[in-house]
Image (tube, rainbow, N blue to C red):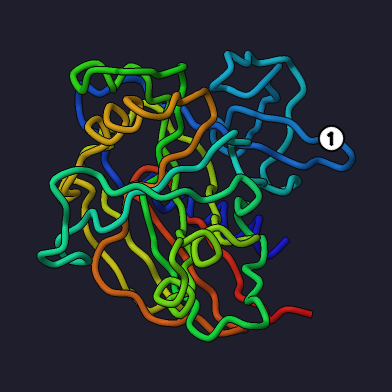
Amino acid sequence: MYFRRTFVFSYLVVALLVPISAGAAEVKRFVRIQAGAVTAYGQLDGNTVTRLTAAPYLGGRPSGPTHDLDAVTLLAPAEPGKVIAVALNFRSHAGNAGAAKPELFAKLPSSVIGPGADIVVPREATSLHYEGELVVVIGRTARNVPEAEAKGYVFGVTAGNDVSERGWQSADIQWLRAKASDGFGPVGPMIVTGLNYGDLMIETRLNGRVEQRESSKFLIHGVDRIVAYISRYITLHPGDLIFTGTPGRTRPMQPGDTVEVTIEGIGTLRNQVVAAD
């Protein structure tokens, strides 16, 4: 109940204080919920969730039953077949290491957790960091998409935390363990369509202290270029997620910490950090 109430507060703050650019497409908000024994996708209007017939990125339509947001548990808002991420995509994080092309790595669908879910610190982990990021949700099958047309393949955007174990990142040849362990991909609280994803403020807080704050307009490789580049090599399908990169510096999280990623127009993704059993 704490999460549901604090989410509603954060959602209202963002909705009331963050302006939406004039002339932008209609803004719609979609969630995935647990309501008793029912798991469903829904469209969010104010404090009311209207169930959809399927995932919104699969063409789901309103089906009638409604729920108060306060009465449901929010889950990860997408069920991706694949999760791709871009490394070193802000100068404030990469310095001079930012590459001429998007540097890709994979996270696993099993790493994805939702808002309010616990980030469990693996027993062998020694330096677990947050990375607040804008996350793209694909809406159409994309293969060899020109950059100028990439926008038409983006369903919407959400907030994400590319949880990273820095010791493993340095020690392992591949980043799979460091980036794709269970629970290392929190996303949510909702998917939002109609936003100008080329200029959204991303803010990460650890225990209430602002640790990262920068606009997506400073991405080295913007969303459209990322989608086009990935689609040259990997076919993207509706519901797939792309983590676009983190700004600034990061530091370790400890059990008992709360990490929050707030993105303009989307809301706040909040997770607790806990020790493994």
Residue 139, image x, y percentages: 46, 21
How busy is the neighbourhood of tag 1: few (under 14 within 10 Å), some, or many (20 plus)? few
Residue 31, image x, y percentages: 60, 36
Residue nearest the observer in this picture, 92 or 46: 92
Residue nearest the observer in this picture, 252 or 26: 252
Quadrant of the image for the C terminus? bottom right
- Identify the residue at horizontal 48%, vertical 38% (top origin): 241
Please indicate whether residue 82 sits to the left or right of residue 70 in the image: left
Q: Circle 1 — which element?
A: strand
* Residue closest to the far front: 173
- Identify the residue at horizontal 51%, vertical 23% (top origin): 237
Quadrant of the image for the N terminus? bottom right
The quarter holding residue 174 reads bottom left
Residue 238, image x, y percentages: 52, 23
Residue nearest the observer in this picture, 67 or 208: 208
Residue 8, image x, y percentages: 56, 52
Q: Mark 1 points at which residue?
A: 38
- Identify the residue at horizontal 28%, vertical 36% (top origin): 226
* Residue closest to the far left: 96
43 above or below 184? above
Task: Report the amino acid beneath label 1.
Answer: Val
The quarter holding residue 167 reads bottom left
* Residue closest to the far right: 37
- Identify the residue at horizontal 49%, vertical 61% (top origin): 179
